[in-house]
Amino acid sequence: MYRIMTPTLPLVLIVSAALFSIGLLAALSRRHAIFILIGIEMMLAAANLNFIAFWRFAPPPHPSTGVMIAIFSIAISAAEAAVGLAMVIAVYRHYRTTNVDEYDQLKG
Amino acid sequence: MSGVAFILISILTLAAALATATLPNLMHAAFCFVLALLGLASFFFLLGAEFVGLALVFIYIGAVAVLIVFTILLTRRDSKEHHGVNWSGVLIAFAVFVGLIWAVLKTQSLSIVPPHIRALTVRQIGQTLMTGYVWPLQCVGLLLTAALIGALVLVMEEKK
Amino acid sequence: MSSALDQIFVHAKHWLLSWIAGAPGWVVQIVSSLINIVALLIVFLTLFALISVLERKILGRMQNRYGPNRVGPFGLFQPVADGIKMLIKEDIVPARADKVLHFLAPVILAAVAILTLGVIPYGRNMTAFRIDGGILFFFAVGSATELAVFMAGWASNNKFSMLGAMRAIAQMFSYELPLIITVLPAVMVVGSLMPDRIVFAQGEYTLGIVPRWFVFTPWGAAAFILFFVSGLVESNRTPFDVPEGESEIVAGHMTEYSGFKYATFFLAEYLGMFAVSGMAVTLFLGGWHAPARVLEFVPSYLWFFGKLSALLFVYIWLRATLPRTRVDQMMNVAWKFMLPMAFTCVIAAAVWHYGGRGLRGWLWSLLVIVVVYSALSILLDTRRKFARRVYRFAE
Amino acid sequence: MNPGILSNLWLLPAVPFAAAVVILSLPKSRRKIASGLAIASQVIVLGISIAAFVPTLRTPGFRAVQNFTWFTFGEQTLQLGFVLDPLAAAMLLMISLVGLCIFVFSVGYMADDVNFTRFFAYMSFFSGAMLGVAIANSLLLFFMFWELVGLASYLLIGFWIDRPSAAAAAKKAFITTRIGDMGFFLGMLWLYHGSGTLVFYNDGRGCLEGAGLALLGGSATFIALLIFCGAVGKSGQFPLHVWLPDAMEGPTPVSALIHAATMVAAGVFLVARVYPLFSLGATNGVTSSLTVVVWIGVTTALMAALIAIAQSDIKRILAYSTVSQLGLMMVSLGVGGVAAGIMHLLAHGFFKALLFLGSGSVIHGCHHEQDIRKMGGLRRLMPVTFATYAIGMLALSGVPLFFSGGWSKEEILHATAHWSPSRAPYYLMLAGVVLTALYMTRQMIYVFFGNRRSAAEHAHESPRVMTMPLIVLAIGTVFLSVVLTPAWPWMDDYLTGESAHFSIAELIQPMLFISLVLVGVGIAVGIWLYRKAGEQDRDRAAEVDPLEYAQPAVFRFLANKMWIDELYARTIIAFAWASARLSDWMDRYFWDGLVRGFGAIGQLFGVFTTDMDERCINAGVDETTVGARGLGRLLSGAHSGQIQMYLGVVAVGMLALLLLYAWLA
C-alpha cells in the first residue's frame, strides 16, 4: 500500500541535525524568553525526527518503539510548553520584561 | 518523486526554522515556527508515520502555537526590542551543527537500504499503547494533568 | 442499474484516468488527486452558492417576507450577483496592519475548511482522501482555524478585531473539547479512526427497517446533540455568533476586511459548516447509508447530501429562531455541562458495548446518561439565583 | 435452600448505608429527595426482608449461612458471614416494617426541623446497621454493626445538639453502653482464644456448634457472662439502665425506633443468638450464667415498673416501661423460654413503637409539651391517636386474646413458673404485671381523659402522614396476636423449628385466668386511684399525686429514680474524679521533679562540652570555612544567572562529548 520511496537515512539525519542546530541557535541567541522555549521545542522536534527516521530505517523485525517514543515525546513537550509559557507569564509579571538577560536573580 | 518532495519539504522546514530564529517581528517568527512544524509533520508523513504527523499538527498547531501567540500578546507591554546578536551563541550553534554533520557522515553503518515495511496503522499503535506501553501512557496522563494544574497555579493572579 | 447509477462518478473518474494510463505512477497519482480536488471544489462551491441564497430565502419565509427574488428565476442567480459585487469592491488594507498576515488569514481559513472536507465519505467508494487516521486529520487540520482567526484579528491592528478574535478562540477552544470527545464513542465502538469504516459499521438494519445508525443508541443520540451544538459553536453560527456580534464589536475579526477577502471569510465559514455537518452525518447519521433496506436503490451520495441538507436546514432554522447567547453563559455551559456529558457518552458507549450491544446494553447506557444528566441538571440548577426582573417605566 | 436470597443479604445494610451517604451529600434544602430516598431504601429493605422470610417459612428449622474471608494474616483467616434463620428473618421483618412506619411518621414529625436531611441520613444509617446486626453470622461482624448502631444512637440522641441536655444524654448513653461493650469485647477475645473462630455457624465448625463448644468447656460460663455485659449495657438492664430514660432527649421517632423497638432489643437478641454458650452444660435447663440473667432481669423489670409509676414525663414513663419489658424478656431467656422471649421482643417492637409514635403525636399536638399533668381530655381532640394508643396500652398491659403483648407475656409467665431453682421470679413477675397495668392506666387517664389543662388547650389531631403509621402499627399489634395464641402457636413453632398445629384446648389455661385477674386488678386500681385526676381543670403540675399524698417518702424515692444516678455520681464518678486528681498531682510534682532533676544533670554536662567545642573543634572548622569561602567566591563568578550562558556551556559540553566519541571511534 504505502510504497513511498524514502530518501536515505544520512540525509534525514542531516536535516534533523540542521533543525537541531537552528533550535540551538534560537535558544542561544534570542533574548526573548518565549523564543528560548521555542528553540527548545524545535530541538525536541528534531529529536523526534531522528526517532522516526531510525524507526523507518530499522531492519525487520520491526518494533514500533521509535513511533511510541515520538508520541510520548510530543505529549511531554506539550506539557513542557504549557508550564514553560505559564512561567514566562509569571516571571513577566514580576520583572515587567521578557528579556532573559535581566532575569538574573532568584530574589523576588 | 519523493526525492523532490523531500528536498522541497526540507528547504521549507529549514527556512521557516531559520526565520523563527532570526526574524525581529515576534509574531512573524511565531508563525514561522508553525510553518516549520508543518514541514516537520510532512516529513513524518513522508516517512510513513502518519499518526505521529497528525498528532504533531494537532498538538502543536492546534494548541501550543495558540498558546505561544497568546503569551506573546500578553507580554506585549515589553516594547523594547532586544536587538543585538549574541555572536557566541551563533558560534556555538554552528560548531554543534558542524560536529553533528561530521558525526553523521563519518558513521558508516548508517548507509542502509530502507526496508520495505507495512504501514503502522492507528489500530496497531493503539494496541501497542494499551499493552506494552500502558504504564508510560498512564504516567504521561499524570504528567499532563500535573502540568495543567501547575500552569494554572503559576498564572493565577495572587489575591491580596 | 442502480449500482451503475450509484458508482457513476467513480466510473467517470476511472474513465478519465484511463486516458493517461501509460504515464508513470506519480503522474497518475497527481492527476487522480487533482480530479478529486476539482470535484470537491465544484460541488461545494455550488452548494455554497445555493445555500447562501436558500438561507436568505428561508430566513425571509420565517420572518414573513420574500427574500431575494429579483435576479434570475426565483432569485437563484443572486449569489452570482453577490460574487460580482464582492469582486469589484475595493480591497482595503488598514495602514498599520500587518500586510502579510492580513492577506494570509482568509486564505488559510478557506484552505483549512476545504482540506477538512476531503476526508468525508460522500458515497460508496467516494472519499477524496482515504487515510487511516481520517478523523484525526479532520480535527488536526481543523484546529488550524483558531490560528487563522487569531491572525486575522491580530494583523488588522484594530481593537474590535482583536476582541473578536479573542472571543472566537476562547469559544472554539472550549467547545473543541466536547466536539472531539463526543467523537470518541463512535471511534471506540467501531475501533477505527477511518471515516469509511465508521460509515460501514452503521450499514446494518435491525429487522430490515431500523438502521443501525449510532444516533439511535442512547450514547449516540446524546453525543450527536453535543456534537451538533459544539459544531454550531465551532462554525460561529447563531446563536453562538458571539465573536462577530454586530451589535457589540462590529464584525469581530472580520471588521477590517472588505471585498473578496471578506467573501473568502464568508466562504470559509460556510465550508466549515458543511464540514462539521458532514462529519456529524458520517459519525452518527449513518453516512451515505439509506434509512431502510428497501430504499437502497437510491444512489448513496444522494442520501448523504439529503442528510447534509437536513442538518443545514436546522442550522438556518436555529439562526432564525434563537437570540445570541452571552459569552460567560456559553463558557459555563461548555465546561460545566458539555464536557461532563461528553465524557458520559464515552462511558455510556462502553456500557452499551459490554452490555452486549443489544437491548440490555441500550437500556443500561440510557440509564447512565439519564442519571448523569439529571445529576448535572440538579447540580447546575441556577434557578435560585435569578431575581425577578423589574421594569421601570417613566412614572 | 435458597442461595439467591442468601447472596443478596449484603444489600440489607448496604442499601440504607448508600441512602445515608447520598442524603448526607445533598444540600439542606433538598428535603423531599432526602425523605424520599430514605423511605425508598426502607421499602427496598422491606422487600428483601420479605424475600428472606419466605424460604424460612417453607422449611421448618431453616438455617443457611454464607461466610467469606475478610482477611488472612499468616495461618489465620478471619471469617465473617451472614446467616438466615427464623430468628434473623423475624427480626428483619420486624425491623424493616416498624422502621418503615417510623420513617413515614418522621416526615410529619420532623417537618419543621432545619436539619431534616441530616435526620434522615442518620436514620437510614441506623436502619442499615441494625439490619446488619440481625443477619451477622460472626460475633465480630455482630460487634461491628453493634457499635455502628451505638454510634447512630449517639448521633440521634444528640440530634438537637444545641440543647445541652441532649448533648449530655448522648454522652451518657455512649459511655454507659461502652462499659457493657468492654465486657462484650473481652468475652469475644476469650471466645476467639478458646474456640479459634468467631463465626456462629459454619457447617459444624462454628463457635456455636458442637465442636466449637466442646473446646470451650468450663470457660463458657465466664464468656457468656462477659458477653451478657454487652447485652446489659445495650438493653438497659440494671445496673446500666440509667442511660435509657435520658435518651428520651432525642426526637420521638428516634425513641420509637432505637430506644424502644429495635436497638435496645439487640441485647436480648444477642443473648438469644449466642444461647448455646449460655446453656452449655446445663442441668435441667439451669446454668449459673442463665441464673444471673434471670436475676438481673427480674430486678430490672420490677425496679423499672416501680419507677414508672411516679414519673410525669410521657416519654420517660414509656422509657421505664421499655426497661421493664426488656427485663421481662431477659427473664424469659434465662429460664429457658427463648422462643417466648423473642416473641415478646417482636410483639414489644410493634406495640412500643406504636406507643412512642402515639406519644409523639400527642407531643406534636400539644406543641412539644411532655408533662402528662398538663394534658388531659385529648380523647376528643385526637381520636385516631387515642384509639391507637389505647390498643398499644392494652397490649403492653398484657390484656390477652386480642392483643399481642398479652399472649407473649403469658408464655413468659408460663416458662418462669416452671423454672426449677426458685419460684420467686414467677411471683415477682406477677407483681410486675399488676404494676404495668397500673402505670399505663395512670398515663391514659392523665393524657386522654378528664378536662383539658394548659397544654391541651390548642391541641389538634396530627396530619395523615403521622396517623397512617399509627394505624398500620395498631393493625400489626392486633394481627400478631393471631400468630401468638397458644391455640395455634405458629410463632413459637416457627422459631423452634417445629410445625404448627391447632388445638383450641390450649386456649383455656388456669394461668390465663390468673393474669387476667391481675391485669384487671391493675387497671381497676389505676382507675380508682386516679379517678379524680381528670375532674379538676387546674394545672396538675402544682398538685399532689394521689400516691404522693398517701406515701410521700416512697413516692419521692421512686420519682427520683431510686437515687441511682446520684449513687453513681457519689461513688463511681467521684472515684474517677479522685483518681484523676491524684494522677494530675503525681504528674505535676513527682514525675515533673524527676524530669527536672535529669535536666539539671544534662545542663551541667552541657557547660563542660561547650568549653571543649569552642577551644578545639571550632577553630578547625573556621579554618576550613575560610578556604571554602575563597573557592566559592571563585566559582560564583560562573553563576551569573544568565540562562543562555548555561545553555551555551551545555552545548559546548555536548560538542566535546561528540568529539570524544569521534576520537574514540
Image (spheres, coloured by chain):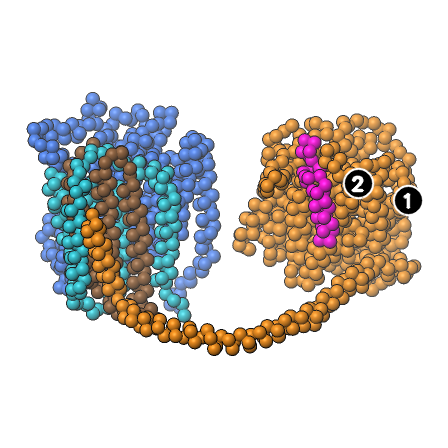
Chain containing mark 1: D
Amino acid type shown at disc 1: Ala
Q: Nearer the viewer, residue D175 or B96?
A: B96
- Magenta part, dominant SS: helix
Q: Nearer the viewer, residue C41 or C201?
A: C201
For residue A107, which quarter of the picture?
A: bottom left
Residue D505 included in the magenta stretch of the image: no
Chain containing mark 2: D
Residue D191 included in the magenta stretch of the image: yes
Quadrant of the frame with the N terminus of chain D: top right
Identify which residue is drawn at 33% across, 35% down.
Answer: C191
Question: Could you say which chain is coloured orange in the image?
Answer: D
Image spot of residue D325 (x, y percent) = 80, 46
Checking the image for residue D218, the label placed there is 2
Residue contact at pointers 1 and 2, CB within 8 angstroms: no
Image spot of residue D35 (x, y percent) = 59, 48
Question: How much space separates mark 1 and mark 2, taking CA atoms?
Answer: 28 Å
Q: Is residue D468 visible?
A: no
Question: Could you say which chain is coloured brown in the image?
Answer: A
Q: Is residue D648 left or right of residue D357?
A: left
Q: Which residues are magenta?
A: D178-207
Residue hosting label 1: D424
Q: Is residue D180 visible?
A: yes
Q: Residues within 10 Å of mark 2 (few under 14, many from 20)?
A: few
Q: Nearer the viewer, residue D295 or D470?
A: D295
Who comes first in sequence, dot 1 or dot 2?
2
For residue C373, which quarter of the picture?
A: top left
Question: Could you say which chain is coloured cyan in the image?
Answer: B
Identify which residue is drawn at 7% across, 28% down.
Answer: C22
